[in-house]
Image (cartoon, rainbow, N blue to C red):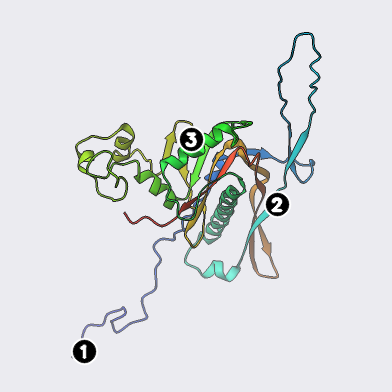
Amino acid sequence: MAGTNTAGSSGTLQTSLPTVFSRFMLLEQERGKVINTATRETLQPHTGSAFNYINYNQFVAQSATDGVDAAQAQTLADTKTAYSPAEVVVNAVVSDRTLARVADPKLLAEIGEISMNALELKEDQDGCAKFSSFTPTLGGTSTVATLGHLLAGEAILRIGNSTATPEPAPGPWFATLHPNSMAAAAVRTIPLAAGPGATSLGTAGVLGQAVVGGAINDTGLQVLRGKGLVRQLDMGELMVMADANVAINSTPTTTNGIYSKRGLVFVSEVTPYMRQERDESLRGIEITCVTSYAWGVYRPAAYGINVSFDGTTPTS
């Protein structure tokens, strides 16, 4: 006697069940972060191909003797810094038959969102890539990030990287770090050894007796209460944030930035837009997303720091 007929991979009707897709998902990307730490400018139409900054030199005051000609007339000088935007484009073509056959009725809208996300991703990556243009440097290939490095960066900004002729970087100040490097700095704010002052502070992922007993400072308590030092640190005047688009090489070493908002410049020429056009010869629809912008640094010797840290992915 024949058994019961069933449908499915192990049944008698193995190919009769349709594949039903219950949900269509987009992949997440890190975007739209570093632009919030930059000075934004707009290149207006009919004003050329570059946005230009002009800065004058500094004068030097000198002591004088009563009744004697000062004889120290200062000389003016000016310096131009130019930022030239360039186009960034994302393009996709979808045939009529594809739109008619796929299970996702919102495919065209999904493609549009994916394309705009790609523009934002590249914008953020390009911004992070400018950190290497700052001329003062901190850290190195095997340097593990600590709060000391961040405080050192804050000190350098306070003096404009010069003790002879200080040019304090205008606020606000930011430190944008790769998450791998930031985790190492954050964990070192938590007393992890058996007691305060132990040499192994921050080297293990186990809370020590001193922490359990409450013998910690306010910052450590905030960490334990989930205030988010791993995500964002407020160190007086330096705001620290993580961005996964910070450059990291195979060593792994991350190229981070500690900088004044005035030191990182974003010039927009064309606000991101999307156009949809039908192409009869292709029998489909072409989607094009466009923007035009430029990233740059200003006063790179005084208003920012190129910071290299070890970028090993944390395991504890």
- In this view, the residue in front, 152 or 113, is 152
Q: Can you give x and y, in whole percent of width and height, for residue 31 in the image? A: 52, 50
Numbered label tally? 3
Rounded to the nearest whole Å, what is the CA distance between mark 1 and mark 2? 71 Å
At a point 80% along the width and 28% down the height, the residue shown is 75
Local packing at callout 2 (Cα closer than 10 Å; few below 14, some 14-19, many 20+) is some
Q: Earlier in the sequence, mark 1 or mark 2?
A: 1
Local packing at callout 3 (Cα closer than 10 Å; few below 14, some 14-19, many 20+) is many
Question: In the rendered view, does 219 fall on the left or right side of 38?
Answer: left
Q: Tag 3's secondary structure? A: strand
Instruction: Determine whether label 3 and label 1 are within 8 Å by CB.
Output: no
**Three-letter amino acid code at the position of disc 2:** Ala
**Three-letter amino acid code at the position of disc 3:** Leu
Q: Earlier in the sequence, mark 2 or mark 3?
A: 2
- The answer to whether one can see residue 316 in this image is yes
The residue under label 1 is 2
Q: Tag 2's secondary structure? A: strand
- The answer to whether one can see residue 245 in this image is no
Foreground label between 2 and 3: 3
The residue under label 2 is 86
Question: In the rendered view, does 251 fall on the left or right side of 89?
Answer: left
Rounded to the nearest whole Å, what is the CA distance between mark 3 and mark 1? 77 Å
Q: Earlier in the sequence, mark 3 or mark 1?
A: 1
Local packing at callout 1 (Cα closer than 10 Å; few below 14, some 14-19, many 20+) is few
Q: Quadrant of residue 160?
A: top right
The residue under label 3 is 238
At a point 41% along the width and 61% down the height, the residue shown is 23
